[in-house]
Image (tube, rainbow, N blue to C red):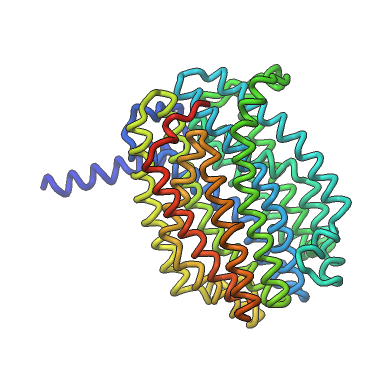
Amino acid sequence: MSQPIEAKSRLSNFFNVLVQAFKGAEIDYTSISIRKAIVLLAVPMMLEMMMESVFVLVDLYFVGHLPNSAEAIQIVGLTESVLTIIYSLAMGLGMAATAVVARRIGEKNPEAASRAGMQTIALATTISVLISITGLIFAKDILLMMGATESTASQGVTFVRIMMGTSIVIMLLFLINGIFRGAGNAAIAMQSLWLANIINIILCPILIRGLGPIPALGLTGAALATAIGRGTGVLFQIYHLAKGSGNLKVKLAYLKPQLEQIKAIVKIAAPAVLQFVIASCSWIFLAELVATTGGDHGSAGYQTALRLMMFFMLPAWGLSNAAATLVGQNMGAGRMDRAEQSVFVTIKYSMIFMGVVMVLFLTCGHLFASFFTEDQQIRDVAVEALRILSYGFILYGIGMVLVSAFNGAGDTWTPTKINVVAFWFFQIPFAYFLAKYLNMGPTGVFIAIPVAEIGITIASYIIFKKGNWKKTAV
């Protein structure tokens, strides 16, 4: 009888931890068990990242059923490829905020953590204004540069202007969630994305297809729905910052520029931003290469596969973010052994998750693709891409955790250097060689992606084991 009772007790404890993860609470992650800490952080972080990818999938679903679906899907996909630069800036700043805030929380200095977070917000707002102006002026040129045809680019001008013109909500949504994650308030970060997505899901069909007196706006409706949804999520975040939820007790006075604090943030954020920009520029080049070698259908199929991949990949990134928070907070508390152990436990969970995703893509890829488009040519390209990309998923999952560990420690230069070599010196030339010189077209691009990601994982593991990241001062 003791075994059934013990099993029931374990199951009850697990569900209690899950409930705690959803609700959120002020917890000292440097003192509880590592497994419990990972679950409490990873569950809301995975759901948060999954919700981020839902934005694009919802847009793809509705625009994929428009009369001109190939052009519409291509516009959404190419715009998202450009927006990855904004995501890169936001993620880089968010990663810096996570590292600094986590370290200060580990040192039991919540006021310094709050000051660092607010200084990062002020910096991000300034950058967003410049990006918005660029998007409003050069919308059509951006699509043409990405390989879109003249007619496709003309159709997508308004979509690009709205998406890039509201870049501040993208920046703040990522950044403020990074601040909350660093403080261990992962539940608030998750709730903001849930709210943003609910608004987007409600508005998308109404604004795209029309309802009653509301006209059918097509692609423009998709952009408006996404911008309004994200904006609502940011308002939710600001409310909790002002309220002083959890460890963070912010004040407007903290927005006053503090040169030393800004320098410390930029020192971490600059290589972090560069790290993500390097990867994003690689994705942009690959998207352009697929568009020029595979045409509209090849491009639409690749973009469909990419968004499906990111839907499952972003939760894995959320899981890896748990390692970043635990590394930062444990380093702040002087628990280096616990910081390293947290990384390897997180790796185990990431391998399991990515293994399941790989099996799903290999067996059900055609079902996923058919859900988003009725065009058989687009489906065929998407299925091929999903099959090839999935072969590297397990090692990719390991690499994500290791990169997050470096970033959480404040050692943002190491993954940046790895990305330069893997993406620019290997992936791009290799993809070009396969697609152009061997005449493999989009298939060559698909092959280059997992090969480069496997290289990143191997390099990250070797460097992580050397342990120089433990000496990083933040």
Left or right relative to 196: residue 463: left
**Above or below 167: residue 311:** below
Image coordinates for residue 315, horizontal then vertical, percent:
50, 52
Image coordinates for residue 124, horizontal then vertical, percent:
71, 35
- Res 342 quadrant in image: top left
Q: How many marks?
A: 0
Left or right relative to 461: residue 297: right
Which one is in front, 3 or 302? 302
Left or right relative to 8: residue 197: right
- Res 332 quadrant in image: top left
Residue 128 seen in the figure: yes
- Residue depicted at x 51% and y 42%: 414
**Above or below 226: residue 150:** below
Residue 213 seen in the figure: no
- Residue depicted at x 87% and y 66%: 154
- Res 178 quadrant in image: top right
- Residue depicted at x 61% and y 53%: 279
Image coordinates for residue 411, horizontal then vertical, percent:
51, 36
- Residue depicted at x 34% and y 27%: 31
**Above or below 372: residue 250:** above
Which one is in front, 59 or 456? 456
Residue at the extreme left: 1
Image coordinates for residue 352, horizontal then vertical, percent:
36, 57
Which one is in front, 47 or 450? 450
